[in-house]
Image (spheres, grey):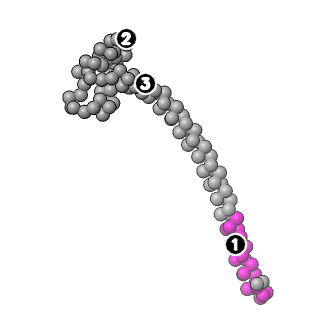
Amino acid sequence: MVIPKTNTSSENWDPKDKFYVVLETATLTEIELAEYCRSKGLYVEQVIAWRDACMQANGGVAQETATLQRNLRDKDKVYKQLQKELNRKERALAETAALLVLQKKCRAIWGEPEDE
């Protein structure tokens, strides 16, 4: 029997139980579906909504996965570009710091006054 033993509302059923109802009603005509729903205490609209959710479940997941993968690739590209820019700026900063140190050493050796 598909109906859960607890006295919960059909909207609060476990997704597995809803799926079983969809499976049981997949081949029923409209009249048979209405009779089935009456006997189980369900509404036809509920079963139709559950059926639609089941049908869209796999397609939605595949599309969502593809979208997430595209977004991840885009973010990876941005990350790599930012990492390249950061490395370039770090090298430039290190070079500038080295030049300043050399400039101070040269002034200390030759005794030239520092520019202010």
Of the image marks 2 and 1, the number of the one nearer the N terminus: 2
Q: Are marks 3 and 1 in contact (CB under 8 Å)?
A: no
Which is in the foreground here, disc 3 or disc 2?
A: 2
Name the residue carrying label 1.
Answer: 98
The type of residue carrying mark 3 is Asp
Image quarter (top left, top right, bottom left or bottom right) of the C terminus: bottom right
**Left or right of residue 5: residue 45:** right
Q: Is 69 colored magenta in this rendering?
A: no
Q: Position of residue 56 (x, y in %)?
A: 46, 26
Q: Position of residue 28 (x, y in %)?
A: 35, 12
Residue at horizontal 33 percent and vertical 26 percent from the top: 18
Residue at horizontal 28 percent and vertical 18 percent from the top: 38
Q: SS for tag 2?
A: loop
Q: Position of residue 115 (x, y in %)?
A: 78, 83
Of the image marks 3 and 2, the number of the one nearer the N terminus: 2
The type of residue carrying mark 1 is Ala
Q: Are marks 3 and 2 in contact (CB under 8 Å)?
A: no
Q: Which mark is residue 56?
A: none
10 Å neighbourhood of mark 3: few (<14), some, or many (≥20)? few
Image quarter (top left, top right, bottom left or bottom right) of the N terminus: top left
Q: Which mark is residue 52?
A: 3
Which span is picked out in magenta? 92-114
Name the residue carrying label 2.
Answer: 29
Distance CA(mark 3)–CA(mark 2): 16 Å
The dominant secondary structure in magenta is helix
Q: From this view, report whether residue 32 is shown above or below residue 15.
A: above
Of the image marks 3 and 1, the number of the one nearer the N terminus: 3
10 Å neighbourhood of mark 1: few (<14), some, or many (≥20)? few
